[in-house]
Image (tube, helix red, strand yellow):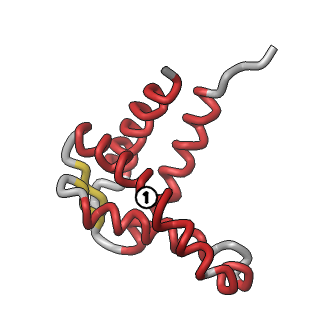
Amino acid sequence: MNGLVRFLLNGLAVLLTGYLLQSGVHVEHYGYALLVVIVLAIVNAIVKPILVIFTIPITVVTLGLFLMVINAGMILLVDYFVAGFEVDGFWWALGFSIILSIFNSMITDFTKEKRN
C-alpha cells in the first residue's frame, strides 16, 4: 500500500512541478504525470546507472555536480517518450529535476514507516 501512495504522490509532484515551471514544462493532466513517473523510474533504473559509470571521471572532477546534468538528461529522455509531457530545453529540465528531487525527498519522509 505504501508503494501505491508514493506512486500517486510522485504523480502529484510531477504535476505540481510542471505547474510551478509552467512557462517551460508542460504536463497535460494527471494521467500523463503518472506516465512520467513510470517512464522516469524505468529510465532511472536502466539508462542512468550506465551513464553514471561512464561519467565517473567527470563526476569526480566536478565534485558530483555532473550528476545534475545526467538527471536533466533523464528528464529530456522522458520528454521524448511521453507525448503529454513537454520540456522546452536543458535548463528547464535541470530546474524540473531539482524541484522534483525536493518533492521526492519530502514524499519519502512523509511515507516513511515510523519505528518504535
Left-right relation of 77 to 58: left
Place of residue 27 in the rendered image (x, y in percent of width and height, measured from the top left): 25, 50
| Residue lying at 52% horizontally and 24% vertically, measured from the top left | 2
Amino acid type of the residue tagged 1 in the rendering: Phe
| Residue lying at 73% horizontally and 76% vertically, measured from the top left | 63
For the image, the number of numbered tags is 1
Place of residue 3 in the rendered image (x, y in percent of width and height, measured from the top left): 49, 29
Place of residue 4 in the rendered image (x, y in percent of width and height, measured from the top left): 43, 27
| Residue lying at 43% horizontally and 58% vertically, measured from the top left | 96
Classify mark 1: helix, strand or loop. Answer: helix
Place of residue 56 in the rendered image (x, y in percent of width and height, measured from the top left): 67, 80
Residue in the foreground of this view, choosing between 90 and 5: 5
CA neighbours of label 1 inside 10 A, class few (<14), some (14 to 19), many (20+): many
Q: Is residue 55 above or below residue 76?
A: below
Residue in the foreground of this view, choosing between 84 and 24: 84
Left-right relation of 52 to 80: right
Left-right relation of 53 to 97: right
Residue position for label 1: 96
Q: Is residue 106 above or below residue 18?
A: above
Left-right relation of 74 to 113: left
- Outermost residue toward the top in this view: 116
Quadrant where the C terminus sits is top right
Q: Is residue 12 above or below residue 62?
A: above
| Residue lying at 51% horizontally and 66% vertically, measured from the top left | 48
